[in-house]
Amino acid sequence: MTLLLIEAARILKLDPAQGWPQTISNYGLAALQTYREGADNKTWRSKARTWREALALAVASGVIEHTSTTERVQVAPAVRRVIHPGLGSSEWDERGFESRSFLGGTLRTAYTKPAQHRDVTRHHITAPVFAVWLAAQGQEPSPHIAAWFKAVGVTPTAPATDTAPPAPVVASVSSAQAKGRRDVLTPAIETAQKECPDPFDAPAVWAVLVSMAGAGAAPLLGASDEGIKWLNSNDEPRFLTLKNLRERLNRKRKTL
């Protein structure tokens, strides 16, 4: 039993004694792919949410083979609350209030707020399928995902890469460059917006763009930690970040 398996089992809430599972849910894959030792929880959860959305969209579009299950999960436990002493209505007994006898009457002293639940659908994905999809996004498996692949006998597919070197970061661009960037990249963003219930939901649009980049939709080349790589009108590689995308969508919203 390895340390990576023990850590993964803790994240997935599984018994490590059972070994690596044959399938992992989209929630679990997103968590394992983005987990890095020492990273703060806020950063980890933010990255995992983006990956989870990308996987959900890939599942919905039929890009990823999967099986689905729906389970009812508790999102808030039952809570016992003590209330200020006083005489209450006779209906409180039906609502779970506790009471005790007081001077010939009934004194309401506490009540229990029921636990809250909701239905959650999880999409379960096999290692071979996830390995192919991961490579299509231009991504290397994380240490935990790589350990899963090895345990179930899957050889990771080499990620799709572009040999062109990253473009240097510049403080500003000329108006001609900016116009070229809008002309080339805007159609791809608009296509991604059409796939989202809210076309100005930046994380949702981002997730679609990540899938498009993995499929090689022009002018997108792939996705990495730096952002989504694309070619401008001069065939120069650039990177689009989630922050850049959010700013673009906000500007477009203001013109409507």
Image (cartoon, rainbow, N blue to C red):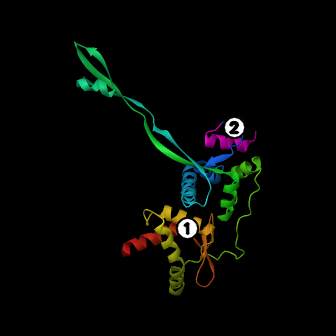
Dot 2 falls on a residue whose secondary structure is: helix
Q: Give how far apart the Cα atoms at labels 1 and 2 are.
A: 36 Å
Report which quarter residue 133 is drawn in: bottom right
Judging by the rendered image, the residue that carries numbered circle 2 is 16
60 or 80: which is nearer to us? 60
**Residue 241 in the image: above or below residue 172:** above
Residue at point 70%, 76% (across, down): 165
**Most distant residue in the top direction:** 104
Judging by the rendered image, the residue that carries numbered circle 1 is 209
Dot 1 falls on a residue whose secondary structure is: helix
Question: Which residues are the magenta region?
Answer: 1-14
Amino acid identity at mark 2: Pro
Location of the N terminus (image quadrant):
top right
Please tell me whether residue 234 belongs to the stretch shown in magenta: no
Q: Position of residue 101 (x, y in %)?
A: 28, 14
Amino acid identity at mark 1: Leu
151 to the left or right of 84: right
Report which quarter residue 229 is drawn in: bottom right
2 to the left or right of 221: right
